[in-house]
Image: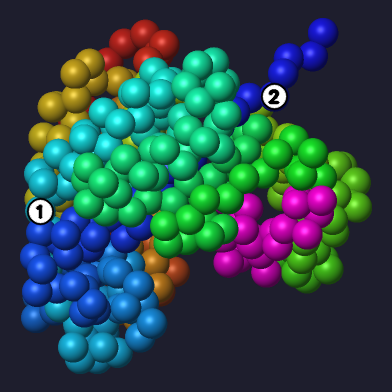
Amino acid sequence: MSHPPRKIIHVDCDCFYAAVEVRDDRSLRGRPVAVGGDPHRRGVIATCNYPARQFGVHSAMASSQALRLCPDLVIVPPNFDKYRKVSAQIHDIFRRYTSLIEPLSLDEAYLDVSASEQYDNSATRIADAIRHEVRQEIGITVSAGVAPNKFLAKIASDWRKPDGLFVITPDDIDAFVQQLPVKKIHGVGPRTAEKLAELGIQTGADLRARPLTELVERFGRFGHRLHELSHGRDERPVKTHRERKSISTEQTYSQDLPTLEACRRQLPELIGDLERRYARLDPAPAVRGVMVKVKFNDFTQTTVEHADPAPNLEQFETLLNVGWARGERPVRLLGVGYRLAEATAAQQLSLF
């Protein structure tokens, strides 16, 4: 016996950090605004509003580059305590309609309203009500996507940004997915999109035309996921509790690290900060692997990982060697992290 389709809403705040800052400072209204680090101290843009985006400014861009593109850009330092409070207020609104809420970050979440009695169980009307209440009570805008599963709801929320609502009904799925550009599929980054394009795969219809065996052969487990998504299928439930899969720390340096040895000298401090962050987890899951991230001075970056339940300094150094060899140029940012085991993993392993 088949179950009725789920009713999933994906809510995504529009330029969240920047929107909160503009809300709280009337002098910023109508101006290009970004939230990020000091351009004179190798700062990076966390997010920016739409007037700034018209100049080509975007998240993860160096603040100094953003100012070159948009000399009138106002860069506001982040205030995460304030953003967390605003996020909590938005979640209070969500809870008026459902208890099945899966936060993805401070500014976006999935809601399962399949069993909601509000608005005669119309997910579209619920999503519109949430957007209205956030605008009236919080003073910022959100975009929402409504669909029978998480994959489509997330795509739909981006379809009419900013301050938009887009609905994909069960009857719409087949036609919508067939014309969907594959680069819109979550997990398809620039490299995967390039590989797909080399195979002549540009849309969901192109993807669907390829045998499952070929996709798995070329893309491994992700090939099976691509096959499922090309048919609009996604059975993942909305999870009210998301387990942490990793923990990490990183540092952008005011002066580039010119050599591999200079990078190595930074590892003990980074690892010390990582250990302190890990110690604050309660309960602390077991470590199942380590990773090192290297961002070079041309903004290319690479991440190297290795599975090991008992990491030590030597392993981080080995991964750094591999990462450095992929660029062999000055480094602006280093990061280290742990991959964490699931909560069912029995014991917490000691470190160092």
The stretch in magenta equals 175-194
Q: In the rendered structure, which amino acid carries the disc numbered 2?
A: Pro
Residue carrying label 1: 79
Check if residue 28 falls in the magenta segment.
Answer: no
Is 96 left or right of 167, judged from the image as shown?
Answer: left
Quarter of the view holding residue 258:
bottom left
Residue at mark 2: 5
- Label 1 neighbour load within 10 Å: few <14, some 14-19, many 20+: few
Point out residue 53 in the picture as x, y percentages from the top left corner: 36, 77
Q: Is residue 179 magenta?
A: yes
Give me the residue at 78% from left, 59% from top.
179
Query: In this rendering, is residue 203 above or below 197?
Result: above
Is 284 placed above or below 14 here?
above
Residue at x 15%, y 78% (from the top left corner): 74
Locate residue 306: give its quadrant: top left
Label 1, secondary structure: give it.
Answer: loop
Amino acid type, residue under disc 1 in the picture: Asn
Local SS, label 2: loop
Q: Quadrant of the N terminus?
A: top right
Q: Which of marks 1 and 2 precedes in the sequence?
A: 2
